[in-house]
Amino acid sequence: MRTLVLGVGNPLMSDDGVGQRLLAELASLPPPLTGVDYVDAGTLSFLLLPRIEDCTALLVLDAARLGGAPGEFREFSGADMDEFLKSTSCSVHEVGMRDLLDAARLTETLPARRALVGVQPDRVAWGDTLSPPVAAAVPAAVALARGILERWQRDVAP
């Protein structure tokens, strides 16, 4: 199983950088997980499509408009992820994850295993640090993401 983990966002826009922060902390957790590639996806681009087409599982880490309190985080998996991404207000990026997944769907390479860990931002404005509530949520959101990866690996173990 080839798993792709994408950290999405702009670290120069305060809480929009939470995806990269989650990615860095997740990638540094011991022990390393085999078959997992960690990629800083920035603010997304269709250049990521070949990476998505080549994976069998996809985990996305991003700031997301959840409609909750700053720092709230949530997992969306499979069809629930697809449904959440249909919302026009779920992402703060122009080219969204929905666009990339739609392109993968058109080429029939959409990973069957896919999940999004989204964190509700407090502020998306110029700044290179996370707001206190979003920074406080990072350890638990990383634990959630690691749990997803470990579950996927257990599910395909011989």
Image (cartoon, rainbow, N blue to C red):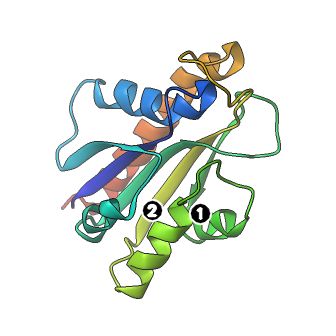
Of mark 2 and mark 1, the one earlier in the sequence is: 1
Residue 121, above or below 46:
above
Residue 143, above or below 41:
above
Gap in angstroms between the C-alphas marked 2 and 1: 8 Å
Callout 2 touching callout 1 (CB < 8 Å): yes
Asked if residue 149 lies left or right of residue 96, the reply is left
Coordinates of residue 1 in the picture (x, y in percent):
21, 61
Coordinates of residue 145 in the picture (x, y in percent):
46, 40
Which structural element holds mark 1? helix
Rendered residue at 36%/55% (across/down)? 152
Along the line of sight, the residue nearer the viewer: 153 or 64: 64
Amino acid type, residue under disc 2 in the picture: Arg
Amino acid type, residue under disc 1 in the picture: Met
Rendered residue at 26%/64% (across/down)? 55
Q: Which mark is residue 94?
A: none
Which structural element holds mark 2? strand
Q: Which mark is residue 114?
A: 2
Along the line of sight, the residue nearer the viewer: 42 or 117: 42
How many residues crowd mark 2 within 10 Å: few (<14), some (14–19), many (20+)? many
What residue did someone put label 1 on?
81
Placement of the C terminus among the 4 image quadrants = bottom left
Rendered residue at 60%/24% (across/down)? 14
